[in-house]
Amino acid sequence: MAVSVDAWGVDLAADLGVPDEPAGVVVFAHGSGSSRHSGRNRSVAESLRRDGFATLLMDLLTEREEREDRVTGHLRFDIELLAERVAASVEWTSRYPATRGLPIGLFGASTGAAAALVAAAGTYLVKAVVSRGGRPDLAGSALARVRAPTLLIVGGRDEQVLELNRAAAERLATVHRIEVVEGATHLFEEPGALDEVARLAGAWFREHL
């Protein structure tokens, strides 16, 4: 169902899906140039709902900001702004009647993974983080403050991002793991690659939520 997330005075469009008796809720932070309509994230979200998790897919930018970003491209790399929006969505999720009291996880892709980690570093509400083809290195000094168990999923053929993930993992002080999906490139477009991402994410959230 369509909902509006109040991100401290900014209304962000979102889609909330809640299965019967959810075990937790996963908030999605999309990557650069994407939105809540991302086919890859929606596919993973659908799998997580089958696993018994509620999902919140949201736009991290308003329509006006999206139009501006399509021209300048700078907001999609404003990790501080995106992290504030993710943190606000976590607070909103913790209060919304359908998800209140559920353990909260974050699923971030590309630059959204950095925003998710920065947000997680600032709150005890986040109990687990999963990154898909993410740029956790852009979370900077926040990496050392993340308390939520963190799974970094990277394509085996996404060599540069894999190295960035390995370097970022060394800065994580919490429980963490890197999972390499062999044969997959950055967007996990290869047959079965995204299914493997969904399987790994579901297992991580089941363990830690």
Image (cartoon, rainbow, N blue to C red):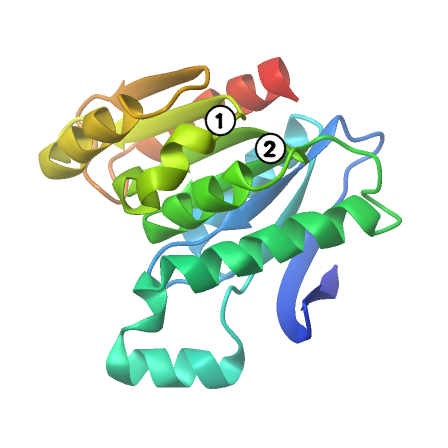
Q: Position of residue 192 (x, y in %)?
A: 33, 29
Question: Of the residues shown, which amino acid type is indicated by label 2?
Answer: Leu
Please tell me whether mark 1 or mark 2 is closer to you in this view: 1
Q: Is residue 193 left or right of residue 151?
A: left
Q: Which residue is mark 2?
A: 48
Q: Indicate the position of residue 114 as horizontal and vertical percent values.
A: 37, 45
So how many labels did they put on this image?
2
- The residue located at (85%, 46%) in the rendering is 98
- Mark number, residue 17: none
Q: Residue at x 71, y 28 (%)?
A: 52
Sooner in the amino-acid sequence: mark 1 or mark 2: 2
Mark 1 touching mark 2, by CB under 8 A? yes
Position of 125 with respect to 164 (left or right) is right
For disc 1, the neighbor class at 10 Å (few under 14, some 14 to 19, many from 20) is many
136 or 154, which lies in front? 136
User: Can you say whether 192 is above or below 2 in the image?
Assistant: above
Residue type pointed to by label 1: Ala
Q: Give the answer, above or below, for where 163 lies relative to 56.
A: above
Q: Quadrant of the N terminus?
A: bottom right
Residue 33 visible in the snapshot? no
Give the position of the C terminus as an image quadrant.
Answer: top right
**Residue 119 coordinates in the image, percent (x, y):** 52, 46
One can see residue 164 in this view:
yes
Query: How much space separates mark 1 and mark 2, taking CA atoms?
Result: 8 Å
- Residue 40, percent across and down? 41, 47
Where residue 32 sits, quadrant-wise, is: bottom left
Q: Quadrant of residue 208?
A: top right
* Residue assigned mark 1: 201
> Helix, strand, or loop for circle 2?
helix
Q: Position of 163 compared to 12: left or right?
A: left
Work out whether 107 lies above or below 148. below
The residue at the point 48 percent across, 54 percent down is 83
